[in-house]
Image (cartoon, rainbow, N blue to C red):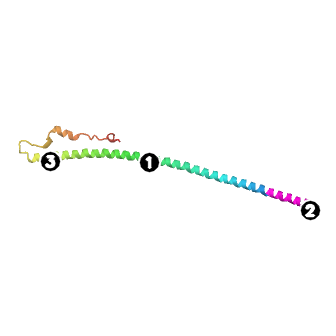
Amino acid sequence: MASLSATSSEVEDLQQLMDQRKRKRMISNRESARRSRMRKQTHLNELMTQVNQFKDQNNQIVTNINMVTQVYLNVEAENSVLRAQMGELSHRLQSLNEIINCINSANTTIDETEVNCEDDFLNPWNLLLVNQPIMASTDAFMY
């Protein structure tokens, strides 16, 4: 019987050793899972920080795009006004050149009794029309 009791104590010792190893494995697994959760949480925090940074950058880009678009629209409106003013000034220049031509032709034919020019440019009342202000403004070209 002594041999049976020795074997049963060896079995108990073996069982305790296996239980101890099992507990160590469980503790190790729990610690590993805890570290894994911490890594995941850290990674998630980093990703959330990046999301916030990208949102801020996106808002800045949208703001810049809106400002550049507004500047572009202002420049387009100003270009429209300048084109209209250029057309009016070109028309005035053409009218003034016609007046000069008419005056020059009148000077060459001064000996005649009546000077005949197209559109009566020598009429002083018609000359007042030449000094009219340019009426183009940005309000007329808003779209």
For the residue marked with disc 2, what is the amino acid? Ser
125 left or right of 66?
A: left
Residue range highlighted in magenta: 4-20
Secondary structure of the residue carrying tag 2 is helix
10 left or right of 30?
A: right
The reply to whether the C-beta atoms of the residues labelled 3 and 1 are less than 8 Å apart is no
The residue pinned by badge 3 equals 101
For the residue marked with disc 3, what is the amino acid? Asn
Does the magenta stretch mainly form a helix, a strand or a loop?
helix
Compared with residue 60, is residue 11 higher up or lower down, i.e. above or below?
below
Residue 67 drawn at (x, y percent): 43, 46
Report the front residue among 58 and 6: 6
Q: Earlier in the sequence, mark 2 or mark 3?
A: 2
Which residue is painted at 66% across and 52% down in the image? 38
Q: Earlier in the sequence, mark 3 or mark 1?
A: 1
The residue pinned by badge 2 equals 3
Please identify, in this view, whether the residue under mark 3 or under mark 1 is nearer the observer.
Answer: 1
- Residues at marks 2 and 3, CA–CA distance in whole angstroms: 143 Å
Q: Quadrant of the N terminus?
A: bottom right
Residue 120 colored in magenta in the image: no
Report the front residue among 143 and 109: 143
Please identify, in this view, whether the residue under mark 2 or under mark 3 is nearer the observer.
Answer: 2
- Residues at marks 1 and 2, CA–CA distance in whole angstroms: 91 Å
Q: Residues within 10 Å of mark 1 (few under 14, many from 20)?
A: few
Which residue is painted at 30% across and 46% down in the image? 82
Residue 108 drawn at (x, y percent): 9, 48
- Residues at marks 3 and 1, CA–CA distance in whole angstroms: 53 Å
Residue 12 colored in magenta in the image: yes
Secondary structure of the residue carrying tag 1 is helix
Which residue is painted at 19% across and 45% down in the image? 96
Please identify, in this view, whether the residue under mark 1 or under mark 2 is nearer the observer.
Answer: 2
The residue pinned by badge 1 equals 65
